Image (tube, helix red, strand yellow):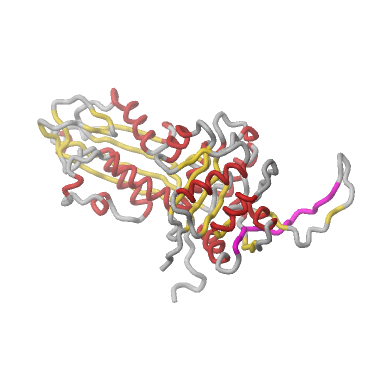
Amino acid sequence: MNTKRIVALIVAAGSGTRLGSAIPKQFAPLAGKPMIAHSIAAFSSHPLITSLTIVIGAGQEAMLARAVGPIHAVTGGATRRESVCAGLEAIMADGGADLVLIHDAARPFLSHTVIDALIAALDKDPGAVPALPVADTLARGIEVLEETVPRDGLWRVQTPQAFRFDAILDAHRRWPKGDDATDDAQMLRRFGWTVAMVEGDVMLEKVTYPADVAAAEARHAATLISRSATGFDVHRLELGEELWLGGVLIPHDKGLSGHSDADVALHAITDALLGCTGEGDIGTHFPPSDPQWRGAASYRFLQHAAAIITKKGGVIDFIDLTLICEEPRIGPHRAAMRTRIAELLALAEDQVSIKATTTERLGFTGRGEGIAAQACATVRLPVVRPPVGGAA
């Protein structure tokens, strides 16, 4: 059992001007969610990470909240080194740590494999970094090509960089004022500590310029496989109940009856999303026998299913919903429902389709006794390959 306190420190204080985005790049969308959300998901889902601290720029609190919700954040400084130092001091004020992993939000696609290797390396050395060998030919020159530079022993250093907390905090506190540093590992080495190298990952390429976004999207897409699943639900119409459909309260003389708010549309979408993950259905996660879900808002079920997909590193691509009823008329409420579902799932509205049909007065929906909903979700999830040679 791991007894060490291991804290992840994500540096997200930059302005991102080189990306040309209207907002800082760490909050800009990438592969279906804000860039910073990818790193947060990677650390949050790792069993050895105790807690997360985010360093943001002054005035970026609202952008962070919109991107990932409530999370511990501190304000950084004018340089990356000052921002990291502010984060380390905040961790110290919160009880300190045994180990810390310092990561740039601009390297979004972090794997548990890299985290594991870095943590293991700290058993021997006070610092560790992921690195990849330089593959390109290197040369000197201004405007014209001059001599080439041997690339033997040259490495591209990535983040996260991992350290014994006391050692890296001491290095930051002792660093000469006015002397900047863009790399924490070099700071540790200046004071005589050794830094190990572990195998890096091409998925950790940094996003700096507009072309990097397209390259990052392509790398991420290559790791995903598309899945589709359907969901179906029915609820009875009764007098005295509120009618919630697609997260919208609709005026009507009857409402849907159920253990929760009985939003048949959101229930069907929830089951479709859960179907894509292979993790049961809405009744598995929110059993009607559990009193805590009595009258619960169905958007909570929907966002729970979406969170499972996010935690797995997946992306929701499209939702198609069909409502089956004689009344109420869906047309006047279609736009509001589409907007609400897109908002709940952090999708663009053109990623949500809502249709309505009747059963020509046939069956329980035709008699006005209830409303049925059928949904189809298309999701991309990381490829999980079986071990070579099959199961033992």
Q: Residue furthest top?
A: 332
Q: Is residue 217 visible?
A: no
Q: Which residue sits at x=53%, y=36%? A: 28
Left or right: residue 337 compared with residue 203? left
What residue appears at the point 62 percent right and 58 percent down from the top-left corner?
A: 129
Q: Nearer the viewer, residue 291 or 239?
A: 291
Image quadrant assignment for residue 251: top left
Residues rendered magenta in the picture:
126-140
Image: 346 above or below 313: above
- Residue 338: x and y in percent read 35, 31
The rendered magenta stretch, by its main secondary structure, is classed as strand
Is residue 239 or residue 56 the one in the foreground?
56
Count of residue discs = 0
Q: Residue furthest bottom?
A: 392
Between 145 and 78, the one lying in front of the other is 78
What is the x, y in percent for residue 110? 54, 53
The quadrant of the image that shows the C terminus is: bottom left
* Residue 215 found in image quarter: top right
**Residue 313 drawn at (x, y percent):** 46, 51
Q: Residue at x 28, y 52 (%)?
A: 281
Q: Quadrant of the N terminus?
A: bottom left
Q: Please report the residue visible at 57 percent of the width from the left and 53 percent of the height from the top.
A: 169
